[in-house]
């Protein structure tokens, strides 16, 4: 496809290799970043960050790219291993410390109440600013590993996690409910016609 911008020189070898492989895989799809974003549920700007090594992609983004590129089996597993090695070596930006925020037991009080001098009024607490909200759960390396997935990926995951024996009772329950609904419809139809 188009020419890629050069990767930063200071990137670790694992990260460089991983991003280069992702770029080749993306090129193999023949898709633009917009089309790739539509097919994978990750935005064009996210793919730009991932493919320019500005930010590591979540594991599910890599899996989605493999799926779109027609990669399966061992090759997908190799991408998973490359992802893991790259995320461990990915350069970290220092995170500024978050100041502690007191929150009353009943929840935050909307707005802030203060007395002259800028100190909170006795017994009053300020609401927690959105900037200091607790971040979503992160993987052991600090990177999000399970972002919002498209519903079609969630269905595959759910069914693969459940053993066949646990799905059978659920199917029987659905069949029984359907039979009851059909029986009720037949009774109501017979009563209204009769």
Image: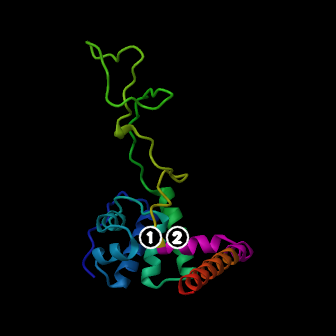
The residue indicated by pointer 1 is 150
The quadrant in which the N terminus is found is bottom left
- How is the rendered protein coloured? rainbow
Answer whether residue 169 is magenta in the image: yes
Q: Residues within 10 Å of mark 1 (few under 14, many from 20)?
A: few
Query: How far across and down, in percent of the image, does residue 115 sit?
Result: 29, 14
Dot 1: what SS? loop
Q: Residues within 10 Å of mark 2 (few under 14, many from 20)?
A: few
Magenta span of residues: 152-170
Residue at horizontal 57 percent and vertical 86 percent from the top? 194
Q: Main secondary structure of the magenta part?
A: helix
1 and 2 marks in contact (CB < 8 Å): yes
Circle count: 2
The residue indicated by pointer 2 is 154
Query: How far across and down, in percent of the image, does residue 150 sit?
Result: 44, 70
Query: How far across and down, in percent of the image, does residue 12 sit?
Result: 43, 59
């Amino acid at each position: 496809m188009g020419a890629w911008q050069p990767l930063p020189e200071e990137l670790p070898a694992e990260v460089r290799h991983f991003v280069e492989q992702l770029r080749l895989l993306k090129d193999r799809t023949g898709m633009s970043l917009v089309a790739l974003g539509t097919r994978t549920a990750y935005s064009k700007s996210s793919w730009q960050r991932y493919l320019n090594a500005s930010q590591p992609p979540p594991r599910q983004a890599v899996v989605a790219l493999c799926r779109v590129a027609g990669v399966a089996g061992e090759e997908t597993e190799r991408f998973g291993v490359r992802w893991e090695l790259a995320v461990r070596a990915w350069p970290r930006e220092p995170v500024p410390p978050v100041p502690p925020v007191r929150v009353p037991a009943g929840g935050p009080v909307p707005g802030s109440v203060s007395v002259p001098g800028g100190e909170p009024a006795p017994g009053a607490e300020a609401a927690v600013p959105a900037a200091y909200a607790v971040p979503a759960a992160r993987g052991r390396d600090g990177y999000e590993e399970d972002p919002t997935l498209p519903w079609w990926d969630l269905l595959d995951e759910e069914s693969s996690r459940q053993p066949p024996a646990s799905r059978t009772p659920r199917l029987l329950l659905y069949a029984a409910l359907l039979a009851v609904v059909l029986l009720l419809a037949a009774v109501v139809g017979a009563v209204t016609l009769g």
